[in-house]
Image (tube, rainbow, N blue to C red):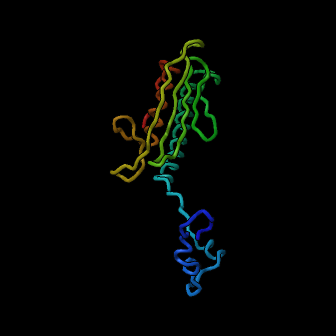
């Protein structure tokens, strides 16, 4: 008879016998504490190009700052006041901004995705106080350069740029802030 009086079929433990389901004392087992210490867990997979992407980001920040200083030195030599210069905003992101109209602001961030590092950014600004430039968005994945095994930014149709070249490409957005002035933005 089963566990319930109305159940006429025997249970599985009754069919096999209670001793067969018990742990066999002849088989050694480890204590529970020991099993916890030896259990393995899945380690997170390393992000591809994490160190190389971080180094590229640091180099890009240095190059952007160098170009900003060169643009400002050229503007000062042409007699522009300090409030019309490009400013560097420190922090986790790269941010270059010229507040006086025509203004330009370049903001860049890096993210480390499963497939590799990606630089995302925006370029915004005002032609006049009430007239904005059309904002540009930028998404540039970083990849290993097969020629020299360095890391490059892959722009658009497969054009690869070093950190210096990408900084020069971005700094060209300040041309609208300084009409008639040749920007020192060469790679």
Outermost residue, right direction?
Answer: 33
In front: 10, or 103? 10
From the top left corner, tell me how far across and down residue 51 is, in percent. 51, 54
Q: Quadrant of residue 2?
A: bottom right
Height in image: 162 above or below 12?
above
Q: Position of residue 138 (x, y in %)?
A: 47, 32
Spot occupied by residue 107 in the image (x, y as percentages of width and height):
55, 32
Q: Which residue is pictured at 61% across the width and 22% down the height?
A: 99
Q: Give the side of residue 106 with respect to residue 158, left or right.
A: right
Up the image or down, 8 lies above or below 113; here it is below
Labels in figure, total: 0
Q: Residue at x 55, y 24 (%)?
A: 104
Q: Residue at x 55, y 68 (%)?
A: 40
Q: Quadrant of the N terminus?
A: bottom right
> How far from the left and from the top, in percent, is residue 18?
58, 78
Looking at the image, is 163 positioned above or below residue 178? below
Q: Nearer the viewer, residue 148 or 40?
A: 40
- Left of 162 or right of it: where is 13? right
Instruction: Assign the C terminus to one quadrant of the image.
Output: top left
User: Which residue is at 53% across, 62% downward?
Assistant: 42
- Residue 183 shows in this picture: no
């Amino acid at each position: 008879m089963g566990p319930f009086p109305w159940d006429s079929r025997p249970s599985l433990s009754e069919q096999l016998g209670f001793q067969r389901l018990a742990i066999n004392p002849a088989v050694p087992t480890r204590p529970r504490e020991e099993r916890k210490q030896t259990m393995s867990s899945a380690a997170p997979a390393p992000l591809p190009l994490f160190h190389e992407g971080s180094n590229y980001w640091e180099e890009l920040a240095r190059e952007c700052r160098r170009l900003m200083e060169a643009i400002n030195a050229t503007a000062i030599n042409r007699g522009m006041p300090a409030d019309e210069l490009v400013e560097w905003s420190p922090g986790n992101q790269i941010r270059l901004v010229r507040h006086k109209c025509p203004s330009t602001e370049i903001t860049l961030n890096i993210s480390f995705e499963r497939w590799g590092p990606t630089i995302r950014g925006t370029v915004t600004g005002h032609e006049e106080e009430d007239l904005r430039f059309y904002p540009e968005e930028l998404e540039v994945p970083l990849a290993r350069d097969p020629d020299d095994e360095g890391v490059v930014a892959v722009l658009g149709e497969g054009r690869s740029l070093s950190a210096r070249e990408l900084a020069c490409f971005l700094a060209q957005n300040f041309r609208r802030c300084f009409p008639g002035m040749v920007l020192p933005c060469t790679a």
